[in-house]
Structures are given as C-alpha cells and as structure tokens.
Amino acid sequence: MSLVKRHIAQRFDQAANSYDQYAVIQYQIAKALFELCDPWYETVVDLGAGSGFMANLMQVNYPNIILLDISYQLLSLTNEFHQQKIQGDFEKLPIIDKATNAIVSNMALQWSDNVIKSLSECHRVLKDEGHLYLSMPIEGTFCELHQACEHVGANVKQFLGLGDITALLEQNGFEIVLSQQDYWQACFQNLRHLLKSIKATGVSYTPSTVNKTLRGKYFLRDIEYFYQALRTVQGLLPLTYQIGFIKAVKR
Ligand SMILES: C[S@@+](CC[C@H](N)C(=O)[O-])C[C@H]1O[C@@H](n2cnc3c(N)ncnc32)[C@H](O)[C@@H]1O
C-alpha cells in the first residue's frame, strides 16, 4: 500500500469512533442514494463502506452485500449482521471479474488518488449490464472554506464537477442512466466546531498547497476572521456540501 493510502487508512482508523456521531450529512446522503437503487440485486458491493451506512439500509432487501473499505477500524464497527467484509483498496479491488450485479459507493470515491483506475475496477468486477450507484461531493462543496482559504493565500484543491465524473464514467465503458445534484448545508457555532466535524469524519483540512508560514494559529485566525462575514441570520457558520448522484450501467 502506498504511503498516501496508508495515511488515508490511518485517518479513517483514528476517526472511526467518532465517525457516526459526526457523519450526519453523510447518512442523509446515503439515504438519498439508497432511494435511487433498484429494489433488488443478488449481489451488491459497497465501496468505501465505512461504518456501514449504505449496507445497513440495504440489508433488508439485498441478500448478499460485500463491504469493502481501506480502514480496518471502520469495518470492525459495522453491524455483525454483515458477514462479508474486505479490507481493500478500491483502486485495486481484491474481487474477481464480473462478480457482482451492483456496486454502491456513498461519499467515498472522492478519496481515490486515481478515479479512472477506481472506475475501471468497478467496470471489471461488475457483471455485464451491472449497475453502479455513486454519490460524491462535487465542485462547490466547502465553498465557504475554500473562499476563506483563498482569501488568506491558500490554493485549495477543488472537487471534480458532475460533468467531469460522468465523462470519466463514459470513457470507462459506462452509460449514464441518471445524474443529478443536490446540496446540504451544515451550520456551526464557530470555526473550531466546523473543523472538528470535518476531521471527525476523516478529513483533515490542511491544504497541502498552503505556505507553511501561513499555517497554525494565524492561518486559522485569518480564516475565522474572513468566515465571520458568512454567518447566517441565525449567527452560525455555514458549510455547504454539493453532492453528485449518479446511476450508470456497464456496457
Ligand atoms: C466519507 S467516508 C464514507 C463512508 C461510508 N460510505 C458512509 O456513507 O458513511 C469515506 C470512506 O472511504 C474509505 N476509503 C478511502 N480511500 C479508500 C480506498 N482507496 N479504498 C477503499 N476505501 C477507501 C474510507 O476509509 C472511508 O470509510
């Protein structure tokens, strides 16, 4: 496993115990993705299953769910009801060709270093005409934080646009059946709570491109100063999630 992957796995291992408590929006998004799924598949693989939000929603109707995640700690927190759990990397799936009727992935593939590789792995392990359901944060997610970082001189990596993701799927042998976007907004008393919530769901928001001298106390103080102007009428700090939902068929 590469160093970057090891680092990601460690982050999620560390966040495992607090994940469910803070991942309120991720759970709402899982429910929205679940609503899009066909009512029955013989076999479903949940990629980046985390603590099992999707798998728990699906367990009633779907007899065979395989949970795959890079974080051992998150997988170990999943419901004992789930028998098939694999610690693995979605860029190199330890699953044979044409093994599954459907793949679901809620809020996970944005973690891929190489989205093309992950999508081609999805294509490989799906049966012919198999279905792929994705939800991912897209361009516009964390726009307030991005604006604040840019204001203090930090360039932050943007999420892919919905069109970019559908184009990559088409280039990798998928036909798009549905692509839509929706947004959620979380609100916080202060920047500390906002950053804590991001960190507790596995994300450390320390833009790698930020000049080291800008980081630390002053960096956060300057971001907080800028962020104050964005307070809602209730006096809270907003954090926007723009989410892309996609259903695609293997062709
Ligand atoms: C934001 S969490 C979403 C978890 C879950 N799907 C949910 O709805 O709560 C992202 C998940 O992707 C997993 N992940 C990140 N990189 C991965 C990789 N290369 N292979 C497999 N899982 C990965 C993390 O361990 C984490 O569980």
Image: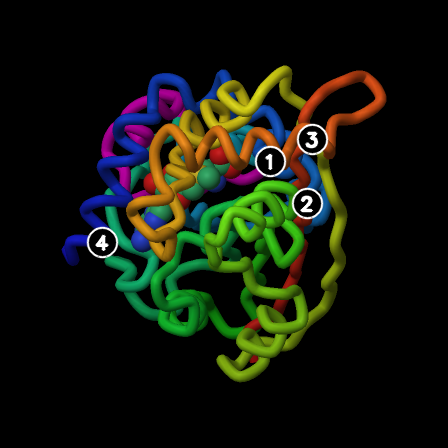
Is the residue marked by circle 3 packed among few (<14), some (14-19), or many (20+) residues within 10 Å? Answer: many
- Rendering coords of residue 85 (x, y %): 30, 38
Image quadrant of residue 28? top right
Are discs 3 and 2 less than 8 Å apart at CB?
A: no
Q: Residue at x 74, y 54 (%)?
A: 181
Q: CA distance from mark 4 to mark 1?
A: 36 Å
Are discs 1 and 2 less than 8 Å apart at CB?
A: yes
Q: Say which of marks 3 and 2 sits in front.
A: 3
| SS assignment at label 4 | helix
Q: Amino acid at mark 4?
A: Val
Q: Quick check: 117 left or right of 197?
A: left
Q: Residue at x 58, y 42 (%)?
A: 145
Are discs 3 and 1 less than 8 Å apart at CB?
A: no
Q: CA distance from mark 4 to mark 2?
A: 37 Å
Q: Earlier in the sequence, mark 4 or mark 1?
A: 4
Q: Earlier in the sequence, mark 4 or mark 2?
A: 4
Asked whether mark 2 lies closer than 8 Å to ligand 1, one says: no
Q: Amino acid at mark 1?
A: Asn
Provide the residue span drawn in magenta.
62-81
Q: Say which of marks 3 and 1 sits in front.
A: 3
Residue located beneath label 2 in the image: 39
Q: CA distance from mark 3 to mark 1?
A: 36 Å
Residue located beneath label 1 in the image: 61
Quadrant where the N terminus is found in the figure? bottom left
Q: Amino acid at mark 2?
A: Pro
Image quadrant of residue 57? top right
